[in-house]
Amino acid sequence: MSNTVDPPITPKKRKRKEENKTEMQNIKEYGTTQIPTAGLVSNIHCITIIGQVEGHIILPPQNKTTKYEHVIPQLLAVEQNPQIEGLLILLNTVGGDVEAGLALAEMIDGLSKPTVSIVLGGGHSIGVPIAVAADYTLIVETATMTIHPIRLTGLVIGVPQTYEYLDKMQDRVVRFIECHSNISNKSLRELMFRTGDLARDIGTVLVGKDAVESGLIHEVGGVSRAIMKLNELIEKNKQK
Amino acid sequence: MVIYTPIPPEIIWQDTNETDFKIIEEKINGIAVNILVTSDSTARIERILSTDPQDYLKALYQPGLNIEYQAVMKK
């Protein structure tokens, strides 16, 4: 029968209806549900380095990038803000600009606050010095790190592509990794120039545990271990 | 500039001519976000650029959210 009338919507009911609606929209449009925040203020901040590390040249839009002009001021803000006591660096990067990557690595290394990095998915090429720049480094079991020479897949724009130039570039990266991790120059170069591991290049892919055994990374572990270690370092830093 | 990556250069540099991307940086209530301008008055949040993990939990800044955006009002 068409003459049946809907019960009137009371304010309370309407409110609930609206709440349901926004919740539904959340799930439908963004594929997420809302997480309760409870007004927590975090003393640990995090920086995610994803995709390509973008430096002096803007990469074509199909590349996912982390721009160094975003990250450097963030690192400065972390250093300055007295409420931030520690920094977690999450890496899932395929490498990128050497200069930008080294700049980020030096910035992370220069922070007075405790830093812990965690390699998730991948931390390849220039991602390696960024990972080892932190005070303590972690890698999840399934993550990989590709160690390979710059010159074979490197692309040089506007400079003479001489062997010496790339060799010097390579030395800067190698020296940084060597100084900030437990790997020796010799074994790093051995991994870098190994043949038969990569299909298109010479070099090595280190999976989780291998990265720890080579001395590049301190420990295999996930996010809970990273936060635990960071809190430990924060406590130590406070006692100083 | 040297790019150090296992990704082949031909994949990185494809579509180099396609420079018309409308992703811009904007601050919403002090939180830096990347937004994609979808029309004269609307934009979509693409990415949050904050170090505070709590910012990522705020419903107002979830990536994918369509927002009203007036490009002229910005300046």
Image (cartoon, rainbow, N blue to C red):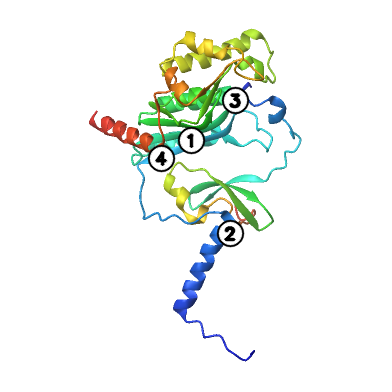
Q: Which residue is mark 3?
A: A97
| Percent coordinates x, y for residue B30 in the rendering | 48, 49
Of residues A136 and A102, the one nearer the viewer is A136
Looking at the image, can residue A6 be seen? yes
> Label 1 is placed on what type of residue?
Pro
Q: Chain of mark 3?
A: A
Q: Chain of mark 4?
A: A
Work out whether mark 2 precedes mark 4 in sequence or the reverse, and give the earlier one.
2
Residue A45 sits above or below residue B2 on the image: below
Work out whether mark 3 precedes mark 1 in sequence or the reverse, and give the earlier one.
1
Asked where in the image residue A220 lies, by quadrant, the reply is: top left
Q: Which residue is mark 2?
A: A28
Please give left or right for residue A18 compared with residue B52 in the image: right
- In space, the residues marked 3 and 1 are separated at their CA atoms by 18 Å
Looking at the image, can residue B75 be seen? no
> Label 4 is placed on what type of residue?
His
Please give left or right for residue A65 compared with residue A71 in the image: right
| Percent coordinates x, y for residue A194 in the rendering | 57, 12
Residue A218 sits above or below residue B39 on the image: above
Q: Are marks 2 and 3 on the same chain?
A: yes
- In space, the residues marked 2 and 3 are separated at their CA atoms by 38 Å
Q: Chain of mark 2?
A: A
Q: Are marks 4 and 3 on the same chain?
A: yes
What label does residue A45 carry, if any?
4
Mark 2 or 4, which is nearer the eye? 2
Residues under numbered marks 2 and 4 in contact, where contact means CB atoms less than 8 Å apart? no
| Percent coordinates x, y for residue B23 in the rendering | 64, 45
Question: Which quadrant of the figure contains the C terminus of chain A?
Answer: top left
> Label 3 is placed on what type of residue?
Asp
Mark 1 or 4, which is nearer the eye? 4
What label does residue A73 carry, if any?
1
> Label 2 is placed on what type of residue?
Lys
